[in-house]
Image (spheres, coloured by chain):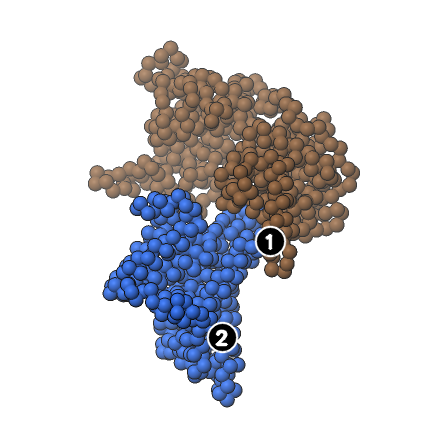
Chain colours: A brown, B blue
Amino acid sequence: MSETPGGDNGDIVLRAEGVNKDFGGVPVLKDIRLDVRRGEILGIIGENGAGKSTLMKIFSGIYPPSSGRIFVEGRETKIESAIDARRLGISLVPQEFNLIRDLPVYNNVFLGSELRTRLGFLDKEEMRRRTRALLADLSVSIDPEAKIEAMSAAEKQMVEICKALAFEARVIIMDEPTTMLTKYEIEILFNLVVKLRANGMTVIYISHKLKEVKALCDRVVVLRDGVIVLDSPTASVSVMEMAQRMVGRELSSIFPAKRVPDAEIVFEARGVTVPGVIDDVSFTLHRGEILGLAGLVGAGRTEVAETVLGLRRKTTGRFLRGGAPVSLEAPADAVRAGISYLSEDRQGAGIVTGFSVLKNITLVSLGRYCRSLFGLVDNTAERTKVQGYVDSFRIKTESLDKRLENLSGGNQQKVSLAKSIDTEPDILIVDEPTRGVDVQAKHEIYRFINDLVGKGISCILISSELEEIIGMCNRVAVMRDGKIVGTLEGADINEEEIMFYATGAREEAAS
Amino acid sequence: MTLAARVSRIDLEKYGSLLALGGLFVLAAVIGWPYFLQIENLVNVMRQSSYTGIMALGMTFVIISGGIDLSVGAMAAFVASCGVLVMNYVMKAAGGAEVVPILLGIGVMVLLGLVCGALNGILVTKGKIVPFIVTLGTMSIFRYVSLQMANAGEFASHSQAFGELGMSKVISFDVAGSNVSLPTPVLALFLLAFVLSFVLNNTRYGRYLCAVGSNSRVALYSAVRVDRVRFWAYAIIGACIGLSAALLAARFNTVSTPNFGLGFELDAIAAVIIGGTAMTGGRGSVWGTVIGVFILQIIQNMLNMAGLSPYLQGVVKGIVIIASVYIQKQRQ
């Protein structure tokens, strides 16, 4: 407070001036100018990849900006680490909790900055005392001695907030704080945030949920493609307007022309429920159709795919293949039913990085290359087929025996795609097919998918990139909280409509 | 280290352990001159390698699948005890005939090994208990059940022919004027290595085994029946242990329950690792394991000839295991 304002209003605790950030030449934030005022609740919204998290990571010392200046309390500051940020009074409450399950609350609150006695031992008494005081301040009834593992998500969040407050925080950044909370818990959190503001604290509130931002925040900043496109008091902007600002981008013409699907229904889900994951999901898929599954991260899209594959146990509902009930209890059942899946988690569930191009592509379909009872692999047939994929997909590799860990992300993805179509499926589920690949590979992947659909294959496209959904799909099912909340067709497939459903703004508008 | 530096230019992944074996062979020839190179000694080294070697072949599969089996030696003792008991019983019932009881005894050992291995496999896959713990538990169970059965003593075979089988040699040929005959266990080792190597490299099961060990989640998503693949790895090592136990029991014509197969698990694991199979699973080589057991055995033979005490031999063995893994790490 004693710092010279340097021409700035003293009420500004945190300021970004012309901040740019790029990753490997790809700009993520462009010339960000943002003032964060003392004692305000600032909502920051934007689509996936809009740059929200990157900006917050710059504020909390996890990334340095590529260029531009950061001011804390009016003084230009380089925030070089999370500990630096903490010292400056900026704390991040992350979306994924960073708590150690086996340690009690007070140890977690002081994790990494433990208080010590003069002899260098842990000063447990003092840590307990201060944790108790912090918890009392927040009026939450948590025992400082309690272990984290037994706690609910809301309690864990309170501990995270305590952790953020333990070192005289000025600014608390909350990243998607309500994703794991129940309605009641959200209310408690909101009361807490308001209380923090009353104490002169600044809260930066990042969310996908526009209604929450509207209800809680004093000011809202909308980021799109790394640029601030709206900065306004919340009172003077509607939820609809926020959603429009979040998207509202010209569609580029990198997508091939859509084909018209047949009327024949090849696959159907009826009232499929996996408790706590997806809820009463029903959809139909026509021959030669691309059905989009849109929604925010955590809406349950990948989980739908995993249920179709038999990786998750459904308690109710059924699947129909060509009108007849089909049992899908294990991935092998799905393969037999002509269903193939391209995983969003390429390295974790899609490809074996230690395997060669050859062995990856035929991993699912290996049975097709086996001649005898003993499962002897016909290497010639295998190599011929795989060479075909390498040529037609233009996979850049010196040989079929090259290990995938030595290939680029785009080429790995092409291998992964080749792998999922080598079973000659009738139904292909692609989950974030262009994640982490360059533009060139993106185009190619779109074309492959479109070609497959032209051959009568049906496709379910799961994507967080709205352009992709809009550019590719014949129909779009939008998911939120494990449910399909709307199905869009034709001209209704646009960013505004999808975001309205995905964020729950539609309900708001209706009520 | 100049040797290591020069060697690293060749395809070490494939031939590293073979080169090490060659170097060691020359060293042993020098230290143990002239006895080491005598045919009798070399045949003996191979014979001694084959008992742990056959188990190590199965261990190669288990380790490639991302698992481990510590119950090897104890299972061998249990299986051999049961086999000898069955053999003796049948022989008595058959009034002294030997061929059928011996075949039956060996059959029991191999099958019981398969069943015991399958038990490990079920606990690992269906019970979802980590392999280290499962096989640590069954190691204790197999050993102490055998001790209980024999009252910590031994089960002597009543068949003389069984003991002769243990000392038998199968293929005999002339090398440089002297007659060389391969002992039965050595032949068994080579035949089994040939079969398992073929399975690993040319069949669907072999491919799946590597996939499961490399990344079981990817394998699961790729419609590989991960549990089944892992189960069979344990069943296969069980059968290998049964075969090895039969050969070893025949060699002594008795099963001494406190000592039979004692510490074999460590030798088998060491051989697999020295042979270049990744401890983390996903890839490995059956012939590498064969080389691995020979390396271990030659070191022991060489140190014997140099007059080093058996205790210090154990120390050297430990150093070799650690060093070989260290060198493999440096390559990556």
Residue under circle 1? A377
On whether disc 1 and disc 2 are found on a single subunit, the reply is no
State left or right for residue A330 relative to residue A23. right
The N terminus of chain A - image quarter: top left
Q: Residues within 10 Å of mark 2 (few under 14, many from 20)?
A: many
Q: Position of residue A450 (x, y in %)?
A: 68, 34
Q: Is residue A475 left or right of residue B24?
A: right
> Which of the chains bears the disc numbered 1?
A
Mark 1 is surrounded, within 10 Å at the Cα level, by few (under 14), some (14 to 19) or many (20 or more) other residues, namely many
Residue pictured at 42% horizontal, 81% vertical: B157
Q: Residue furthest bottom?
A: B95
Give the residue drawn at x 43%, y 56%: B288
Q: Amino acid at mark 1?
A: Val
Q: In this orientation, which residue lies closer to the viewer: B302 or A498?
A: B302
Q: Residue furthest top?
A: A7
User: Residue at coordinates 39% horizontally, 32% vertically from top-left?
Assistant: A164
Residue corresponding to mark 2: B106
Can you give x and y, in whole percent of width and height, for residue A479 in the image? 63, 36
- Tell me where residue A282 appears, x and y as whole percent: 69, 42
Q: Height in image: B140 above or below A403?
A: below
